[in-house]
Amino acid sequence: MGEIIDPNELSTADGVFLVKLARKAIEAYLRRGEVTKPPPNTPEKLFRLGMSFVTILEYPSNELRGCIGYTQAFEPLIKNVINAAIAAATQDPRFPPMSIEELGRVIIEVSVLSEPKEVNRKGIELVKEVTMGRDGLIADYGIYKGLLLPEVPIDYCWDEETFLSETCLKAGLEPDCWLSNKVRIFKYYTKTFRELEPKGKIIERNLKEEYRRKCRT
């Protein structure tokens, strides 16, 4: 196994590159059934192992249209983004596969994940370990596993306890599962890059500031 890239190593330019590539990968697959290869101008660091989620949102409503990703670094980040993009467009079980006509009506978001770290605190003390707008969460118990990205609680202005409970529900567990010593809770952070409109300007999201502005004022 090679070295895993940390999200903090990515520049805004790297994020722009990944979002544009995710869109190209979706288009190539929907038009021709073709899996895009990393382009010749790919920055070298993007060939290191990495984990990503690609989210597709309807524009301008921001309604979810697909989201798929990976929490294990088993391939180069650049290939991981390509595969996640195609999967988000065609394999999310919550939605039918996208059509090529839809591509001009959605925006693409790429989140690059850090390695998840298990939280050692248990019970109600877990709340103190969660930083809204920074942390994503994973609940893990036997065959049950659920993940929520750090941008999700911004959409609903959840507090820390609600975020933990919703992660339990995503795993198919009871909402208070995080209080159990048998359930493992992991946290991670991301760098997240998003189109402002279809094929439009791409920005790096400041999730902590978004949460503060939307949910704490």
Image: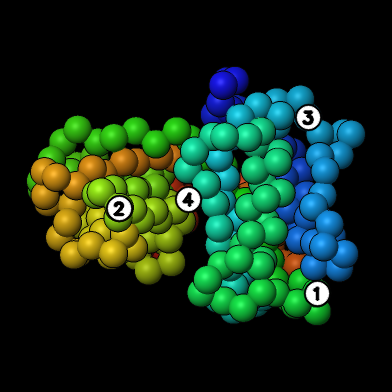
Q: Is residue 190 above or below residue 11?
A: below
Which residue was labeled with disc 3?
43
Point out the tag, 1 or 4, that comes first from the N-terminus. Answer: 1
Which residue was labeled with disc 2?
143
Which residue was labeled with disc 4?
207
Query: From the image, which quarter does the N terminus lie in?
Result: top right
Query: Which residue is found at the position 12% from the left and 51% from the top?
Result: 179
Query: Which residue is found at the position 39% from the left and 47% from the top?
Result: 136
Name which residue type carries label 3. Pro
Name which residue type carries label 1. Ile
Q: Position of residue 161 (x, y in %)?
A: 20, 57
Say if residue 159 shows up in the picture: no
Q: Nearest the camera: 207 or 170?
A: 170
Q: Secondary structure at mark 1?
A: helix
Q: Nearer the viewer, mark 2 or mark 3?
A: 2
Point out the tag, 2 or 1, that comes first from the N-terminus. Answer: 1
Distance between the alpha carbons at the discs numbered 4 and 3: 25 Å
Count residues near mark 2 (Cα–Cα under 10 Å), then give few for <14, some for 14-19, many for 20+: few
Q: Is residue 44 above or below residue 37?
A: above
